[in-house]
Amino acid sequence: MNKIFLPEGYVPSDTEEYMNPMQLEYFKQKLIKWREELLEESRETLIHLKEEIWNEPDLNNRASVEAETTTELRTRDRYRKLIDKIEAAIERVNKGGYGYCEDTGEEIGLKRLEARPVATLCGISMELRVDHPPDLPKMRAVLGNLEIGEIVLQNFGSDKDISIRAGISSEENLMHNIELIKSALTQNFPYEFEYRKVDFVGPQVGNQMIKSGVMALILSFLSIMIYIWIRFEWQFAIGVLAALVHDAVLSLGFLSVTKLDFNLSTIVAILTIVGYSVNDTVVIYDRIRENLRKYNKKPISVIINMSINETLSRTTITVFTTLLANLALIIYGGEAIKSFSVLNNFMRISANDIKSGNILDYEGELWIVAKNPEHTKPGKGGAYVQVEMKNLRTGNKLNQRFSSSESVEKAFLERKEMQYLYKEENLLVFMDPDSFEQVMIDQDLMKDKLPFLADGMSVEVEFYQDKPLSIVLAQTVILEIQETDPVIKGSTATSSYKPAIMVNGLRVMVPPYLVTDAIRGASKFLHRDYFELENLQSSEKNTKFFVDKAKQRVAENLQKSLSKYYKTIIFDNELNLQNLSFSDSAVLVHVLDGEANFERAIPFFALIVTILTKKHDKISADKIVVNFPILGDIYYAEQGKGAWLERHSANFSSGAVRLRVSVKNKLEDRLVCCNYSELPIAAKISPNIRIFESCAYQLALLISGKADVALFLNNPIFTQGFEMLVRESGGLSYVQNNMFIASNYQLQEKLKQILA
């Protein structure tokens, strides 16, 4: 491509062709310049952050600025993501796709492209409803021309509901930018806009809702105090005020932790809680007043305690009835009253109701209940509950005894799905896949979960007051087994497990039918003898005796290792399948497939192990493992779990790769594998033939898509294992005229017609 030179002072214009070569060159140079500026800004920002932290003379002030590592990581990642976007844009310039929306193909517009991207340090989230379905492309163009940062606009819920997210570089102009967005929408669109939610940095509510809610709470508090003052005495009013403030603060704290929407329904719920609280208080105050007249000589503390106990049954019944009604509202009431219903159920729980997994707010700390508590009722004294808890902040454990009559405060954590990225020193970094914001958690708090984490894994991060504390893993994770140990002597395949070491060092118990380690150990003998055979070939000595001894050594080694796992081990074709006698499971071993190749020092030979199971007198293959010692390839398949390939050598070990047969549907130019004795039959199918003298190697080429047809003399002992290997790779096999024939589904009918 020829270099394009831009005239001095050139600026793209709407009058010329959109994204012509000069415009593309102009924006390419602009993007490169922005990238260099961002790299420099990134370095300057990190230096400034370090100086700002260490210039704080007081350690507490220094810590409050922000942890140095955390700040650097966040800053670096923001700039890194922005630089990645610019590099992707440069790539689109080179390919000719720059200037158009990747999703819709619409023109973005020159004015929007002129705005330099900035590192997003905070953002705005708005939810609004319009009276008519909006013109989203036009709305994106209008907001994109505001030059306040990257803006994402989309529908959610109905086609009249709009979500707007804008990333901005500074917190100083948040309110100005919000008003700018509102003004642009009002001036350019003839819609009635209803702004339902405006968030920035953290959850916020509109000013009007704040004023209305605060005013409603103040008026209700004053009215209740005046009522209590008139009905009782002013001292009682002070107690009521303390109780009301307590209930309201707990409700607001519950909203903060659970991140429920703060709306008019929420305010109604708080006022309702205040009303319930006043009702209970009035009932207790009435009883206190009556008891003061009856027992005027008793201390006031005794009278208050007596009055509470006497009215407890009445208030408990009221609370229980209200709880049932609120549960019905939560389940069937819909989203409109969810905040109202959930908030009304926020309460302390009895120690008898504590369960494993509950989060308790105890002595100013958050604790998770590690296991189900022990309930004890001794002969003397009151019943109690022994609870084993773990501190979510420090990881320390605590065994705490609660009285059965005691109540504890149940905390609620917000859970958010995030993706695990990497480990940075002692911190684990997780990313929100929607907003790309990242959080860090101290790995010391998750020592029991750390072994199960893998790069890119999706987990649920638990937050308390916007602070990440822990993660919730999926019920199952997939990890590769590195090695296994033998099980206890005498154990069978169906009644015990054996220890295994995973790639991350975790030790677990696995079913003993995992015999890959035994196969690798036995294959070492074939590997060693293979190179001895190369020397025998040059000396012209008789190799038959040597091959028989090699097979014997492999069989003895496998017999010794596999007998730890299975009672029944069958070698080669010594028995017919119909005469096999075993219960539950057995191992079928073919010590040397491709014996002629091994004898001639050709590397296409394999050790085959098939796991057979017997149910209701029906024998089936559950797993097959095919190991090529010289090639370093292990092919295996398991019933219902696919066919896989692992490659191993002295300096290299690959992970498992899923295998699939080819999808070719023409026989004329397809590759057919066979043994020498089947050459005349193979010639009927295709002129492209490869002879390997190894059934296993033919199947290996077929299931990996390198060959299209495999053809060899059928051996009934191994038919079921071979059929499963082909089937789990998406192929099809059948036996015809004592020939085992395997290919993909598309070729089967043609093969049957040719070989009939």
Image (cartoon, grey):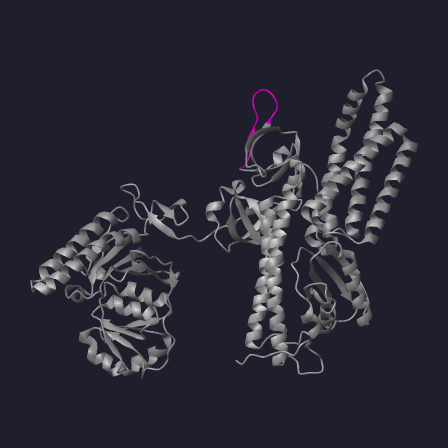
Q: Is residue 322 visible?
A: no
In terms of depth relative to the viewer, which is nearer, 458 or 71? 71
Residue 507 x/y as whole percent: 39, 44
Looking at the image, is 567 positioned above or below residue 710? above
Q: Is residue 381 magenta?
A: yes
The residue positioned 36% from the left and 60% from the top of the image is 639
Q: Quadrant of residue 663?
A: bottom left
Residue 290 x/y as whole percent: 85, 25
Quadrant showing the C terminus: bottom left
Q: Quadrant of residue 5?
A: bottom right
Q: Start and end of the magenta stretch? A: 371-383
Q: Is residue 284 magenta?
A: no
Give the residue at the far right of this rendering: 230
Tell me if 440 is positioned left or right of 450 in this view: right
Residue 687 x/y as whole percent: 26, 83
Tell me if 173 is positioned left or right of 756 in this view: right
User: Overall secondary structure of the magenta stretch?
Assistant: loop
Q: Quadrant of residue 172?
A: bottom right
